[in-house]
Image (cartoon, grey):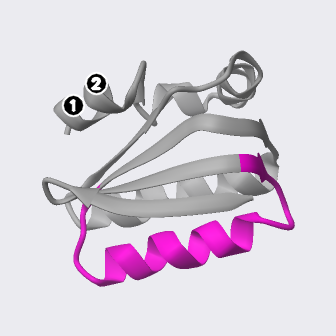
Amino acid sequence: MQISEETKNGVAVFKLEGRLDSNTSPALEERILRVIEDGTNRMVVDFTQLDYISSAGLRVLNLATKKLRHADGRLVICSLQDYVREVFEIAGFDTFIPIAADLNEALAGL
C-alpha cells in the first residue's frame, strides 16, 4: 500500500492506495499516531485509490478516531469505493466515522 500525506489548512490528509490489511495497517497506524502526537487534531483519510480494507484497517481507523476525540479533534474519511463502503456499513463504522463524498466535502466538514 502507498500512503501519501499532506497538510491542507491545518488538516492532515492521508491518501491511501492499494490494500489496507494486516500487513499494511501498522505503517498507517504509525503515521497517524505520529501526526496526532505532533498536535494535529483534524484528519481526513482519502480512500479514492483504496481497493480493500480488512478488520486490521478498521482497527487503525477506530484507534485514530478515539485518539482524536481525546484531543478534541475529528477524523473524516472520503471517496470510498463501493466494496470499502459496504465493509464500513456492515461493521457499523459509518455510525461514528463521518463519510464524505470527496476530499473537498471532507475538508469543509472539519
Relative depth, front residue between 46 and 64: 46
Q: Secondary structure at mark 2?
A: helix
Give the residue displayed 67% in from the left and 22% down from the top.
81
Q: Please tell me how many numbered marks the rendered image carries.
A: 2
In the figure, residue 29 lies in which quadrant? bottom right
Give the residue number, with chain letter if any, for mark 1: 109
Q: Are marks 2 and 1 in contact (CB under 8 Å)?
A: yes
User: Callout 2 environment at 10 Å: few (<14), some (14 to 19), or many (20+)?
Assistant: some
- For this orientation, the residue located farthest to the left is 9
Give the quarter of the figure containing the C terminus. Answer: top left
Amino acid beneath label 2: Glu
User: Is residue 50 magenta-colored?
Assistant: no
In the figure, residue 52 lies in which quadrant? top right
User: Callout 1 environment at 10 Å: few (<14), some (14 to 19), or many (20+)?
Assistant: some
Give the residue displayed 21% in from the left and 31% down from the top.
109
Relative depth, front residue between 2 and 76: 2
Q: CA distance from mark 2 to mark 1?
A: 6 Å
Give the residue displayed 82% in from the left and 55% down from the top.
21
Amino acid beneath label 1: Gly
User: Relative to 30, is 84 on the left or the right?
Assistant: right
Give the quarter of the figure containing the N terminus. Answer: bottom right
Disc marking residue 105: 2
Q: Residue 50: x, y in percent?
A: 69, 39
User: Relative to 44, is 51 on the left or the right?
Assistant: right
User: Is residue 37 magenta-colored?
Assistant: yes
Q: Secondary structure at mark 1?
A: loop
Residue range corresponding to the magenta coloring:
18-42
